[in-house]
Image (cartoon, grey):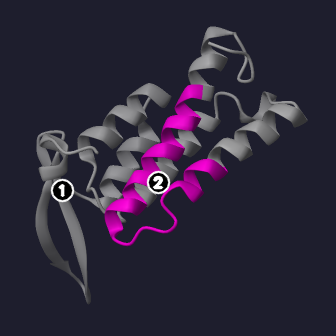
Amino acid sequence: MRFGPSAAVLAGIVWLGSGPAVAAFCLDKSMTLDEIVDVIDASPGCERAMKVFKDCEFGTSGDVRLGAAVEKKCEGDFLGRLKAPQKQAYTREMGVCDRKYRNESGTMYLSFTAFCRAEVARRYSQRAQKGTGPSKPR
């Protein structure tokens, strides 16, 4: 399980408008979920996006949005270049993540799933960057 300094970033609830917005203290300031997603989107690459995700994780369902932003960032490195069998392998690995905690209750398992999916996308990105191809062994 992932418990450490990052799990304690949940700073509290900040009331904005008519509903609550979760805030986290990361990157040396208090940021909303939307602001963290913006930082991930603006990151110069997959590795940096993943670092922001790890540094700013909530350990709850809010990580689903952060993880999706990391997936999107990382997929930009490889998704368009995958052949059909590679794309099927990628989809299969993502499905493994989706099924891994499906019978568990609690929002922390949504976070675990988001991290699993982001790690799969990160691995494919790393392989693409190294030129070894996403489907070849490490």
Query: Circle 2 sits on which residue?
Result: 113
Three-letter amino acid code at disc 1? Answer: Ala
Q: Residues within 10 Å of mark 2 (few under 14, many from 20)?
A: many
For the image, the number of numbered tags is: 2
Which contiguous range is marked in magenta? 95-123
Three-letter amino acid code at disc 2? Answer: Thr
Q: Is residue 45 visible?
A: no
- Is 22 on the left or on the right of 35, as rendered? left
Residue 110 — which label? none
Query: Circle 1 sits on which residue?
Result: 24
Q: Is residue 42 visible?
A: yes
Answer with mark 1 or mark 2, whichever residue precedes in sequence.
1
User: Farthest bottom residue?
Assistant: 18
* Residue at left offset 56%, top offset 27%: 123
Q: Nearer the viewer, residue 28 or 9?
A: 9
Residue 33 drawn at (x, y percent): 31, 60
User: Mark 1 against mark 2, which lies toward the viewer?
Assistant: 2
